[in-house]
């Protein structure tokens, strides 16, 4: 039996519809997990009951409602006992070999701090498959969502945690940009490591808020780079990557 290195963090809020499937996809992994940490943002539905009825080494932590997953993710990182961290959104799933693939790659590329695979889409039956949101995503082969990665826990000591003061819930994208600014090395490949469920209540359905979040991240990045004496730039910094 392999000794697991991985702590999995789920930041949840009113996730009763899908969270059991998310946890089941963790338990089905061909590489075992050390623990699953569910940090709940004050849910008012049956999330807690459902989580506590799932199999696996699960810790359920309930906090007062904050409204942004950054808070839950940060609590999870602080509680995690593994040397590797993986995030899974409550409404998404993983392919069964996700962790096996990514642990092997981080062992092979010891200098990489993060391994990132490909996200595949699961479009719910109720979603208009011709909507702007669905069309924007379905032809995108490689786009970096947190649930497609595995992170060395040490990288959060280097870069810091997720920003808890973002206006438009873009703390995940903000962290990736900060990592790029600090030249964190990413191992990037084309193997599927994340199944992203598109449904009627995705936060990113709101294209206007999504764009405002990107603008906020860009503004913050420009400010940091200016303070660091790196001048003004037209675009986001590029990720430093190993591709194979």
Image (cartoon, rainbow, N blue to C red):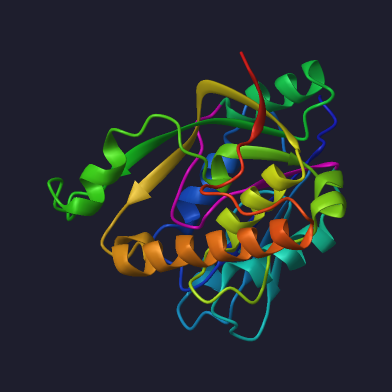
- The reply to whether residue 78 is visible in this rendering is yes
Give how far across and how far down residue 1 sits, in percent.
Answer: 81, 24
Choose between 20 and 135: the one closer to the eye: 135
x then y, percent, for residue 9: 67, 55
| Residue at x 41% of width, y 68% of height | 212
The residue located at (62%, 59%) in the rendering is: 222
Q: Is residue 61 above or below residue 9?
A: below
Q: Is residue 109 magenta?
A: no
Q: How many numbered tags mark residues here?
A: 0
Residue at coordinates 62% horizontally, 54% vertically from top-left? 232
Q: Is residue 59 visible?
A: no
Position above or below: 213 against 119:
below
Viewer-nearest residue: 54 or 83: 83
Q: Is residue 127 left or right of residue 224?
A: left
Give the image location of residue 156, x and y in percent.
Answer: 81, 52
Rendered location of residue 147, percent (x, y): 56, 45
Q: Quadrant of residue 108?
A: top right
> In what quadrant of the picture does the C terminus appear?
top right
Q: Quadrant of residue 160?
A: bottom right
In front of the other: 117 or 213? 213
Q: Is residue 196 left or right of residue 172?
A: left
- In this image, 182 relative to 62: left or right? right
Q: Main secondary structure of the magenta part?
A: loop
Q: Which residues are magenta?
A: 83-96
Q: Nearer the viewer, residue 202 or 98?
A: 202
Would you say residue 95 sits in the magenta stretch? yes
Residue at x-position 77% and y-position 45%: 182
């Amino acid at each position: 039996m392999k000794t697991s290195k991985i702590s999995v963090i789920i930041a949840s809020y009113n996730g009763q519809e899908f969270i059991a499937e998310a946890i089941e996809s963790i338990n089905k992994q061909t590489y075992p997990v050390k623990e699953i940490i569910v940090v709940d943002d004050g849910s008012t539905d049956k999330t807690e009951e459902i989580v506590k009825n799932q199999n696996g080494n699960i810790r359920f932590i309930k906090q007062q409602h904050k409204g942004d997953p950054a808070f839950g993710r940060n609590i999870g990182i602080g509680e995690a006992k593994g040397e590797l961290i993986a995030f899974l959104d409550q409404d998404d799933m993983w392919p069964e070999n996700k962790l096996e693939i990514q642990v092997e790659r981080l062992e092979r590329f010891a200098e990489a701090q993060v391994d990132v695979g490909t996200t595949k889409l699961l479009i719910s039956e109720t979603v208009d498959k011709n909507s702007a949101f669905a069309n924007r995503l379905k032809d995108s082969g490689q786009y970096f969502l947190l649930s497609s990665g595995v992170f060395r826990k040490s990288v959060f000591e280097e870069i810091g945690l997720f920003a808890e003061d973002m206006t438009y819930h873009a703390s995940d994208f903000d962290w990736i940009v900060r990592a790029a600014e600090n030249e964190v090395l990413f191992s990037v490949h084309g193997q599927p490591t994340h199944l992203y469920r598109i449904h009627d209540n995705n936060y990113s359905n709101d294209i206007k808020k999504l764009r405002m979040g990107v603008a906020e991240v860009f503004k913050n990045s420009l400010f940091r780079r200016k303070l660091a004496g790196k001048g003004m730039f037209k675009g986001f910094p590029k990720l430093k990557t190993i591709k194979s």
